[in-house]
Image (cartoon, rainbow, N blue to C red):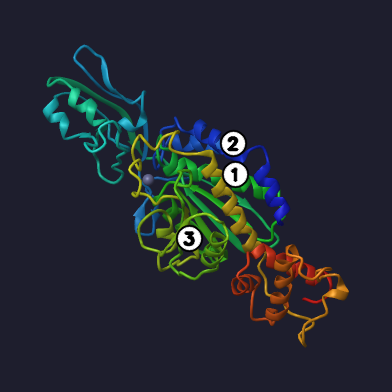
Amino acid sequence: MDMTEIQHALNASEQGSAMYRMIEELYPICRSITGNGVRQTLHGIQQYIPVEVHEVPSGTQVFDWRVPLEWNIRDAYIAAQDGTRVVDFRRCNLHVMSYSVPIKSRMSLKDLQAHLHTLPDRPEWIPYRTSYYKDNWGFCLSHNQLKQLPDTDYEVYIDSSLESGHLTYGECFLPGESAEEVLISTHICHPSLCNDNLSGIAVSAFLCRALQNMQHKLSYRFLFIPGTIGSITWLAMNQEHTNWIRHGLVLTGVGDAGAITYKRSRRGEAKVDLVTTHVLQYSNEPYKIIDFFPYGYDERQYCSPGFNLPVGCLMRTPHGEYSEYHTSADDLEFVRSGSLHNTLSLCLKILFVLENDRIPISLNPYCEPQLGKRGLYRAVAGQKEGALQEMALLWVMNLADGRHSLLDIANKARMPFDVVHTAAKALSDHGLLN
Ligand code: ZN
């Protein structure tokens, strides 16, 4: 993997708008932690990358959890007495609480109220609600719509099923020269929400596609899994294999206009934490780095103490810190192709460092080598352009003592990794480094 390949991947056919189009395609699907919406989504992702679909039977014990019954939904509505659908699942899949049990009943608005969810603070938005592990049913609607409902009887209908079936997830493995792996994980369990879900899917898929066209030393494993239960299931079924995971990122909420946030792994100073910090420092944009805490997305499972994998979480505005989070306002207007492209670019830069970092050893440790006679020194002293590259040569030669990696050198020299990497390559080419 080199910078030219990365530039090529980023320039290729306007990646930002292509990711945005992928989000548009997947937006209408009603996803949950199990069911046909997940299968349909994985089928959609397969149009971009070769994802292998896995099905794990309901009831399978996975650590302290069990794979739940499979949930599917065909139709749902609240209808007025004349049959008019006042709340209609077909118009917006957020209207039905995910994992709602089936119901067909007639009831007063008063009795129905206990099953209605709104956002009084944001009266125009529909909330997103789930009830995965408790039998329940419910509808979500805008507070304005609720206020307009006449106090009368309504027909309530949810045509859903909760049956023994499967938990479905997708996996795409790209073998590298080494069996050491980078894990990229994203959740696929939210219905029509764009930033919290589809943005992570799109950036993961395009990252995978970019890697397919590059030489890479490390192997890459992409997981497209339902949140929490999906990573628990994958970890339970691949417990031994996790020893191969050297670095990992959970990608989530990466399409909004906010600045990048990186949540460190539980280890705090894992390679992926140091590399991401370095890349962000030289990104010339605002960012925030936060410590691990046991809440959020699937990093909670990867970083549970038994695994303690070096997996951080890359997002833009953290979940819960934007008001559109888990509401109908997390829609196609909330995500931006520029943010998607920027996140993809950042991921590629992180992978570039992971791929290319190494510990150089000087073959000329006694005093500085004479760079001039090798054509490595600026021809004209004082020329500005060469200065950074020249300092990089001197830093690498000085710190190539077997105790500093290229990333350590870049940090000590306060230079971006790729400048130090380029210098090290020139020095190797001239036989000065091992
Ligand atoms: Zn969410």
Q: Amino acid at mark 1?
A: Phe
Is the CB of the residue bearing disc 1 within 8 angstroms of ligand 1?
no
Residue at the extreme top of the image, as rendered: 82
Q: What kind of element bears circle 1?
A: helix
The residue wearing badge 1 is 206
Residue 226 placement (x, y as % from top left):
43, 46
Can residue 53 be seen by looking at this rendering? Answer: no
Outermost residue on the front side: it is: 382
Q: Nearer the viewer, residue 426 or 69?
A: 426
Task: Say left or right for 5 vs 147.
Answer: right
Compared with 203, 427 (above or below) is below
| Residue 107, placed above or below residue 380 | above
Residue 220 seen in this snapshot: yes
**Circle nearer the N terminus (2, 1):** 2
In the figure, is residue 402 to the left or right of 193? right
Q: Are marks 2 and 1 in contact (CB under 8 Å)?
A: yes
Identified by mark 2, the residue type is Ala
Q: Nearer the viewer, residue 320 or 338?
A: 338
Task: Answer with the quarter of the image where residue 50 lies.
Answer: top right
Above or below, 200 against 241 in this view is: above
Instruction: Please rate how many residues cluster around mark 1, counting C-alpha atoms within 10 Å: few if below 14, some from 14 to 19, many from 20.
Output: many
Q: Residue furthest right?
A: 373
Q: Amino acid at mark 3?
A: Gly
Q: Mark 3 sits on what residue?
A: 312
Indicate which label's residue lies in the foreground, 2 or 1: 2
Q: Residue at x 14, y 24 (%)?
A: 107
Q: Is residue 229 left or right of residue 347?
A: left
Name the spot of residue 304 as percent of width and height, x first.
40, 64
Query: Which disc, if any, is residue 18?
Result: 2
